[in-house]
Image: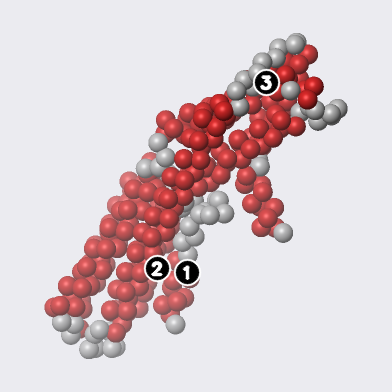
Amino acid sequence: MKKAIRSFSLIINYKTFIITFLAVLSSYVCFHLNLTAKFPDMLVGVAIVFPVVFSIGSAYTRRENALQRYSDFKGHAIALFFACRDWTTTKDSGLPSRMQQMVHNLILKTKVMLKSKPDEWKAQEKEMYGLFSQLSTMTMELRALGVQSGEISRVSQYLSKIIIAFDNMKIIHNYRTPVTLRTYSKVFIYIFPIIYGPYFASTFHDYSAHLEYVMPVLYSFILVSLDNIQDHLENPFDEVGEDDISIDADEVRDFLEH
């Protein structure tokens, strides 16, 4: 029940009620001033619904790509830990425990970066590549622990794929739905229920008493809800929306300890 209420609150928020109030007020004023007009319904689909649905589809595709990139990142990091634990001839070195901590630090730092704003990235990205450098140095210790050159090459590929996956997640985080398209959609979503007041006023006589404002309310709820869905899908790493990616460094560390 709590989850359903939270999901509902993410779609229906204060913006929904503000736009609904303004749409109802616009319809009320237009009706009493006898300002009516028969605007075509297709404008809603062409000018608003189609661009918003396109944006939602684009954001969902980006989320799916982000899931795959995070899976690559975590999977190759875990593979590095297994290599340090199982491929060496010397089993009493401290390399596996240090690699386990390094994997935890990598995932934790990635989570912090992906939840922050792009303008806060410069210093954090420098720290992230410092961790990659340490990881590279640690993998070279495998040579002294009896790991063959062919396996060292494979470990280097794991490291390369971790860095590539991180860079892909960074790009997904920083480059989202075109700003101009989002601005266009928001402007029309927020003003459409208001400027359609004359149209809603013209339909008042088609409804029973006390049902005159059903159309402006429905239009407002539907359009603003679509915009809210797009907003929550826009950043798949902020862990605000129901469909966001959850990055849990402690869960990975607990898995490696067993």
Rendered position, 5 above or below 25: below
Tag 3: Cα neighbours inside 10 Å, few (<14), some, or many (≥20)?
many
Label 2 crowd (10 A; few <14 / some 14-19 / many >=20)? many
Give yes or no for contact between labels 2 and 3 (Cβ–Cβ under 8 Å).
Answer: no
User: Which of 61/19 is in front?
Assistant: 61
Quadrant that contains the C terminus: bottom left
Residue 179 x %, y %: 42, 34
- Compared to residue 217, the image places residue 231 above or below, namely below
Q: Position of residue 71 (x, y in %)?
A: 38, 64
Q: Quadrant of residue 91?
A: bottom left
Residue assigned mark 2: 104
Residue corresponding to mark 3: 199
Kind of residue at disc 1: Asp
Hey, which quadrant is residue 81 in on the image?
A: bottom left
Residue at coordinates 67% horizontally, 49% vertically from top-left?
A: 8
Tags 2 and 1 in contact by the CB under 8 Å rule? yes
Locate residue 206 relative to residue 231 in the image: left or right. Answer: right
Q: Foreground residue, 39 or 238?
A: 39
Position above or below: 19 against 86: above
Circle 1 — which element?
helix
Of pointers 2 and 3, the one earlier in the residue sequence: 2
Relative to residue 103, is residue 251 drawn left or right? right
Disc 1 designates what residue? Answer: 250
